Amino acid sequence: MKLKGKVAIITGSASGIGRGIALAMAKEGAHIAIIDVNEEKGKATLAEVNQFTEGLLFIKDISVKENVNEIVAAVVTRFGKLDILVNNAHVSRQALFTETTQEHLDLSFGTGFYPTFHFMQAAYPELKKTKGKVINFASGAGLDGQVTQTSYAAAKEAIRAISRVAANEWGPEGINVNLISPIALTPGVEQWRDSAPQLYQEMLNKIPLRRLGDPEQDIGQVAVFLASDAANYITGQTIMVDGGSIKLR
């Protein structure tokens, strides 16, 4: 029970990587605030979480700053504190660089970068009290400059930048800020695999470990580690959980 009694906010946690992290942390004893816009999937994940711990569900649009502040306040009111903030939610559209529009940029920054920034600001007073942990998300799209990922890559690298700043500013107060850069077999990737098996296999062949990560067992367990006392001396780092695809220097 590495996270027994801890309280975690996890955005985009109704499905995919967010759900995997929610379940992994719940099984380690953390109370989980599930944040998503999909009510049906959110309720399903809440039911799973409640088998191990106590969870809360917020069906909120986190691109609205006021909703972010309300969520943090409600979680602290219910549980009395906040120990862990996981900024996982992000929506984007693919387009070639020359075809990327302002709408593409607004969507990616509005659902990924700005909610991450606003949650960090809103959570800071509480995380300062608990010497808490922030886990943000990077992507190989930004690190490797993947084609058609202009808006997504830009937002992810912006998230990396503010995470490093916060790690430096908040480190003296005992707050750790790290990032995970994952590759995972999410429901969306499963659909793509079934519709384009040859392309999926080509992608798989480029991963040294020859498989995609499991949202709970691979990505979730690294998130548990970063949220635990075992990671107290790690901050400002991008942890590659991608089967060896990108090796940072």
Image: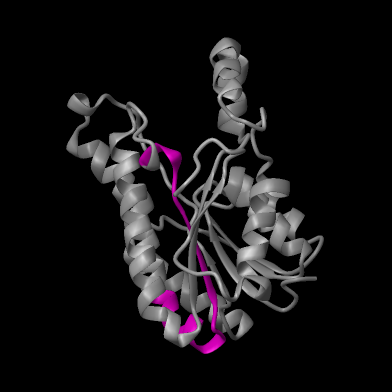
**Residue at (61, 36) in percent of width and height:** 186
Q: Is residue 134 magenta?
A: yes
**Residue farthest along the top direction in this orientation:** 198
Q: Which is nearer the eye, 108 or 38?
A: 108
**Residue at (65, 39) in percent of width and height:** 213
Residue 77: give x, y in percent of width and height.
55, 83
**Residue at (34, 35) in percent of width and height:** 145
Quadrant in the rendering for residue 8: bottom right
Q: Which is nearer the eye, 45 or 239?
A: 239
Residue 88: give x, y in percent of width and height.
50, 53
Q: Which is nearer the eye, 26 or 205?
A: 205
* Image quadrant in which the N terminus is located: bottom right
- Residue 39 is left or right of residue 178, and the answer is right
Give the extent of the magenta segment.
Answer: 122-142
Quadrant in the rendering for residue 115: bottom left
- Residue 3 is left or right of residue 70, and the answer is right
Q: Is residue 186 above or below residue 66?
A: above
- Residue 40 is left or right of residue 161, and the answer is right
**Residue at (72, 72) in percent of width and height:** 3
Q: How is the image coloured?
A: one colour
Q: Which is nearer the eye, 116 or 212?
A: 212
Tell me if I can see residue 43 in this picture.
no
The total number of labels drawn is 0
Residue 151: give x, y in percent of width and height.
29, 39
Residue 72: give x, y in percent of width and height.
48, 74
Q: Is residue 57 magenta?
A: no
Tell me if I can see residue 17 in this picture.
yes
